[in-house]
């Protein structure tokens, strides 16, 4: 089962929309239940490229200007 929701992540700038997936597994032999909860974001967070810092450097900008 998936339920639409919004979460506020620590260190983020605001609410993130997505769905919460709840799964319950029940073992009839041992009478134990296992529950898992997973957040599935509607949009994946932007991945920072390792090259972003280089592209912002003054030396890189000078190289671009010379070409």
Image (cartoon, rainbow, N blue to C red):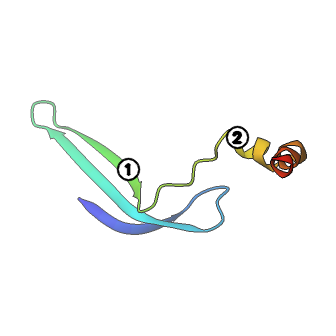
Q: Is residue 57 above or below residue 13?
A: above
Residue furthest to the front in view is: 67
Residue pointed to by mark 1: 38
Residue pointed to by mark 2: 51
- Between 67 and 60, the one nearer to me in the picture: 67
- Between 35 and 7, the one nearer to me in the picture: 7
Q: Is residue 64 left or right of residue 28?
A: right
Residue 29 horizontal/vertical position (percent): 10, 31
Few, some or many C-alpha atoms within 10 Å of disc 2 (few <14, some 14-19, many ≥20)? few
Q: CA distance from mark 2 to mark 1?
A: 31 Å
Marker disc for residue 24:
none
Q: Is residue 19 above or below residue 49?
A: below
Residue furthest to the left in view is: 28
Do the CB atoms of the residues marked 2 and 1 lie less than 8 Å apart?
no
- Between 30 and 15, the one nearer to me in the picture: 15
Q: Is residue 5 left or right of residue 10?
A: left
Q: Residue at x 39, y 55 (%)?
A: 40
Q: Is residue 27 above or below residue 38?
A: above
Residue 14 horizontal/vertical position (percent): 61, 68
Residue furthest to the top in view is: 30
Q: Residue at x 29, y 45 (%)?
A: 35
Q: Quadrant of the N terminus?
A: bottom left
């Amino acid at each position: 089962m998936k339920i639409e929701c919004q979460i506020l992540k620590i260190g983020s700038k605001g609410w993130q929309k997505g769905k919460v997936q709840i799964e319950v597994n029940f073992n009839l032999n041992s009478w134990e239940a296992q529950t898992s909860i997973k957040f599935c974001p509607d949009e994946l967070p932007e991945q920072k490229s390792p090259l972003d810092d280089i592209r912002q450097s003054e030396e890189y900008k000078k190289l671009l200007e010379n070409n």
